[in-house]
Amino acid sequence: MSSNRRIVAATPDDVWKVLADGWLYPLWVVGAARIRDVDASWPDKGSRIHHSIGVWPLLINDHTEVLEVVPGRSIKLRAKGWPVGEAEVTIRLSDVGSQTEVTIEEDAVAGPGVLVPEPIKGLSLKWRNTETLRRLAFVAEGRRPRQP
């Protein structure tokens, strides 16, 4: 399993608003190319984002489902992209003054990814999620009102 943390210059509520808007998913999730649909109940447990991953013209259509959610604090997802496989991703938000510590944990749970040796898998997920958190921070911080 890979675990990354980043301090975001936005409140947990600001960050949660990005996570709770399924249409923003490809802005911050590395590898997500486009959103085809978002369940009206997103991000409730059992709801899905229907996405494509990859680079055109080599796109894979699949979905990500919410396994657990504590609104404003955490979300656990099952991200699918067959034939690549499936991953479980947990994102947690913690107050750090007026900022937010965002933690993302990810592990391959089905498909070829489970066969990749842990040091290699951990390193590739670490790099990917470092960029994912950087993008999430840009979106959350960019949506905040500007100070004069």
Image (cartoon, grey):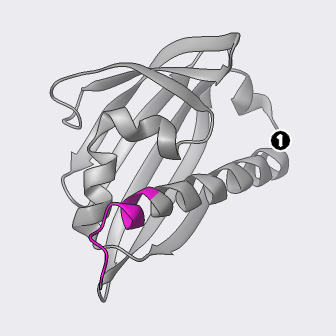
Magenta-tinted stretch? 139-147
Q: Position of residue 22 (x, y in %)?
A: 32, 35
In depth, the one of 12 and 86 nearer the eye is: 12
Q: Quadrant of residue 82?
A: top right
Quarter of the image with the C terminus in it: bottom left
Residue at 40% of width from left, 67% of height from top? 141
Q: Amino acid at mark 1?
A: Pro
Q: Residue 21 occupies which quadrant of the picture?
A: top left
| Magenta-drawn stretch contains 97 | no
Vertical order, 47 against 37 (above or below): below
Using the image as rendered, state which of residue 106 and residue 29 is in the foreground: 29
Q: Please give the residue where the numbered disc 1 appears in the rendered image.
A: 117
Residue pushed farthest bottom?
A: 97
Is 17 displayed left or right of 25 in the figure? left
Q: Residue at x 49, y 61 (%)?
A: 138
- Tell me what residue is drawn at x 77 percent, y 44 percent: 121
Q: Position of residue 139 (x, y in %)?
A: 43, 56
User: Going by the image, does 46 lie left or right of 27?
Assistant: left
Can residue 1 be seen here? no
Percent of width and height locating residue 73 = 26, 61
Q: Quadrant of residue 50?
A: top left
Q: Is residue 60 above or below residue 143?
A: above
Q: Residues within 10 Å of mark 1 (few under 14, many from 20)?
A: few
- Residue drawn 84% across the image and 47% down it: 120
Q: What is the secondary structure assignment of the residue under circle 1? A: loop
**Residue 1 shown left or right of residue 136 in the figure:** right
Is 14 situated left or right of 57 in this image? left
